[in-house]
Image (cartoon, coloured by chain):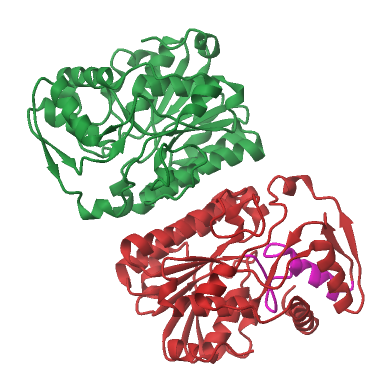
Chain colours: A red, B green
């Protein structure tokens, strides 16, 4: 699936930095940008608990410059940011549970390092164009569904509090310092190159791993509603957001194909896999305390303003993801 | 003015820690707690740009234990927090302009250190009762007036973003980890022992300094609405909040006597001072970018739920403050 052709004009020959670029969405974005003729550089720390994996660059590694660096390492930021035309800022700690047991690490990456990145832009490259990977987690437990961008922000865990601060810094620097930034509030993103070793990035990852390994997977609760964006559609949104001047200083939810319950998603996966099983368990109590209940996004704003359209339906998204891990699983576990 | 008498039962003989306790509100709170028979310990860093001043303990210094320490110095936190019954958590960087020019310092104090304090409580003293000094700054530019606790949270500067994260951590630790905490969202607090050297704590401070020195002070704009809490009334609110079980996990705005415009406040100060003058200037452009416009609080929630009542009207508040600095100014400049 090729991105919209007019994006080639925006990105061909341009210098692009992707933080978290060895990770799930970051690497898919790098692949698309290489295809568009951009000069792609990646920063990734390869922290074992996070999403980075060298395998994610298979086939494009020679056309991408990789800096093994941590965004918490401030002195390195100026050299990385200087001279770049675009910054896709995806580096983050994504596990909600880890944010509760090791809150300071979550803060240092999702909040403090974000401010350091923005300060480096302000001091060394104020003309850079930024898109920040925010999250639906900052809404907390929805007051209403679907959740639009005007919904109150009441995060229910340390990760959500820090991601909200990180997003707020981006919008503040855009408004006050003129560092053009857009925030995309992602929901569950799925697809090839996602972390499947465990549920740190998304529970769908560990479900797929277990299915491919021929083991039953666990569904907690099962009646919760969720929505899913296929990674190529998420990549389109990042590319569009950075390309459009009207997106500067703005926030957009990403959604995707129609919502499903977790139980329905589990059944669909088993069907597409041509077999397999799952066990429904009660929600563990330590997770219930920080659970957001039902969520699905109202994504009409990005559709209307930027013309974004998800192009991959849920069945196709899951089938492609299963096919990828049937072939590639050994590189991801 | 003595605090309500039933508070003596809550605090007499109890161990109380005040972060930022050499500062404006912290030292007035320490004075009240000493009067109530509490065993008061203070943590303060005496950073020259902040509110701490040893003069603020004049008359009670022998009855208070002072730890010169910075809340950013995590290894010291467990020893300070262990064994305390109450924590009044007032340490903070208060200057909005400084938060824009040195954002990382603001983050380290108002956000990162707050999480470290809460982690120290969770690990070493989970039964402690906390009241956190939050701020109206987290609302940003009001959508409506007066601003109640349901108003959207959209901070307009780095200080507001970090204070919001700091408040959110307190409420999260209360909800998830059972560390009983209450947040008070303060508006402009005025009274004896406030910082008057400059406008880093409140612009009223530098107005009063200039008046007492016989110099004209500057009013920026003048038509903005603001409300003011006299420090003794703010102290009452902290003491009440920590004493009341129904305040656990809750947020309360503080307000006070009726709102005034800055121009009216300036005229009132000149009148009470028996002379003096001010110059009205246009709002400086670097400050306009982070200005919140008009603000005054709806404080009915704390009045209704905790029975808090401001007892000092604005004229009395200003007159007492002027009288204090006429005598004490040399210790504060």
Q: Is residue B333 visible from the viewing direction of this image?
A: no
Location of residue A285 with respect to A255 vertically, above or below: above
Location of residue A34 with respect to B96 vertically, above or below: below
- Residue situated in front as seen by the camera: B124 or B88: B88
Left or right: B159, with A166 as reference point? left
Residue for point 60% across, 68% down: A299
Q: Which residues are magenta?
A: A187-214
Location of residue B13 with respect to A265 vertically, above or below: above
- Residue situated in front as seen by the camera: B57 or A73: B57
Looking at this view, name the residue that lies furthest to the top: B5
Does the stretch in magenta take in B86? no
Location of residue B173 with respect to A229 vertically, above or below: above
Q: Is residue A107 visible from the viewing direction of this image?
A: yes
In terms of image quadrants, where is residue A236?
bottom right
Residue for point 61% across, 78% down: A309
Left or right: B84, with A118 as reference point? right
Image x and y of residue A118, in percent: 39, 64
């Amino acid at each position: 699936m090729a991105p919209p052709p007019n994006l080639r004009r925006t990105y061909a020959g341009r210098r692009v930095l992707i933080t978290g670029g060895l990770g799930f969405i970051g690497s898919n974005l790098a692949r698309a940008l290489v295809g568009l003729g951009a000069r792609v550089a990646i920063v990734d720390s390869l922290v074992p608990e996070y999403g980075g994996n060298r395998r994610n660059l298979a086939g494009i590694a020679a056309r991408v410059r990789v800096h093994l660096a941590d965004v918490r390492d401030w002195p390195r930021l100026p050299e990385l940011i200087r001279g770049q035309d675009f910054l896709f800022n995806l580096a983050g700690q994504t596990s909600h549970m880890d944010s509760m047991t090791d809150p300071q690490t979550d803060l240092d990456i999702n909040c403090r390092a974000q401010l350091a990145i923005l300060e480096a832009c302000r001091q060394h490259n104020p003309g850079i164009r930024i898109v920040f990977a925010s999250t639906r987690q900052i809404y907390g437990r929805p007051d209403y569904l679907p959740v639009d961008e005007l919904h109150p922000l009441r995060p229910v865990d340390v990760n959500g509090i820090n991601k909200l601060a990180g997003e707020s810094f981006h919008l503040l620097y855009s408004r006050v310092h003129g560092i053009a930034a857009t925030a995309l509030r992602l929901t569950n993103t799925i697809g090839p190159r996602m972390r499947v070793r465990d549920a740190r990035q998304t529970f769908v990852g560990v479900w797929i791993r277990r299915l491919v390994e021929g083991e039953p997977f666990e569904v907690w609760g099962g009646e919760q509603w969720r929505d899913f964006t296929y990674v190529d559609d998420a990549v389109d949104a990042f590319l569009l957001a950075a390309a459009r001047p009207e997106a500067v200083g703005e926030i957009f939810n990403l959604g995707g194909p129609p919502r499903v319950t977790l139980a329905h998603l589990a059944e669909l996966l088993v069907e597409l896999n041509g077999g397999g099983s799952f066990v429904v368990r009660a929600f563990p109590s330590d997770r219930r305390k920080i659970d957001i209940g039902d969520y699905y996004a109202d994504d009409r704003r990005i559709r209307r303003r930027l013309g974004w359209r998800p192009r991959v339906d849920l069945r196709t998204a899951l089938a492609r993801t299963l096919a990828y891990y049937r072939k590639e699983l050994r590189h991801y576990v």
